Image: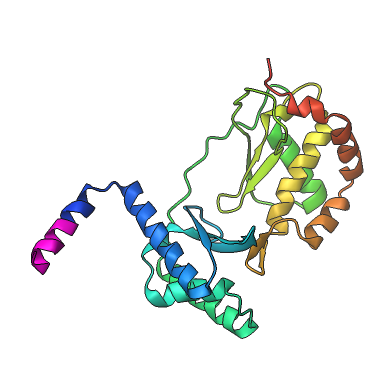
Amino acid sequence: MGTRQLDRQLDLFSARLSNRERRLIAASQLADSISDLVGERVRLIVHDNRSTMVSFRRNAGLLHYRVHHMFLDAPREVVGALADFAGPDRVAARRRDAGSRIDAYVREHRARIGEPKPARLEPVGRVHDLEAIFARVNAEEFGGSVEARITWGPNRGGRRRHTIKTGVYVQDARLIRIHPALDRPEVPEFYVAAVVFHEMLHQVVPAVEKDGRRVVHGPEFKRRERAYSGYARARAWEQENLDLLLSHGVA
């Protein structure tokens, strides 16, 4: 079989692949390339978020990578930077150089990150008005400096859960979502306010990258949260009423 005929067959095979299949193949190839360079087994997860483009951690004998999909077709020198960023040779200058090369690649391909989807806001619940709580906490605790939107999250209900994430702050969209389990008469407003304060604080004390990991609740964040006037009261209520929060939506 001639080279041209083989190339045509490979092109036909590639055309039949779905976007998801192409992405899986590219991710596998990228993981293999990084593994060869660092001399470790690599598990790679591809994401489409808009904040942290690259992160890694070592666990159970594996080097776990999370990379934005823009890196799936990165050139060899950028793949090398990904490997150097987490390689066993932790020379600070080498890691800084790798980080600079990665940052330059991200800036060059920033258009591939995409725009956040507009969120539908529903801040007024059956019991608690999040906009009113946000405005009060912003004035009293932050001098009105926090600029964010706030809404109740979707009410999915279902079976009893073992954990609950009472709120989330979406950095790029400057959006706060509060879990609907808090929108009940049994949940006091001071507790909802403490959760809102926590999420607002993420804008004032943002996450940082440290040793390739994203630190969300660092020492400064924890210090500021403990200084909140309603912190102790809210934590005590949460510990006493955790079963109430976990039972939300259970028939």
Camera-nearest residue between 86 and 118: 86
Question: In the rendered image of this protein, does residue 22 appear above or below residue 106?
Answer: above
Q: Nearer the viewer, residue 110 or 53?
A: 53
246 sits left or right of 63 in the view: right
**Number of marks drawn:** 0
Vertical order, 138 against 55 (above or below)? above
Q: Which residues are magenta?
A: 1-10
The residue positioned 21% from the left and 47% from the top of the image is 16
Magenta span: predominant SS is helix
Q: In this image, 158 relative to 141: left or right?
A: left
Q: Name the residue rendered at 18%, 58% in the picture.
A: 10
Q: Is residue 199 magenta?
A: no
Q: Residue 128: in sight, yes or no?
A: no
Q: Is residue 99 left or right of residue 127?
A: left
- Which of the 4 quarters of the picture holds residue 110? bottom left
Q: Image point 78% across, 57% down: which residue?
A: 221
How are the residues colored? rainbow
Residue 189 placed where, x, y %? 81, 31
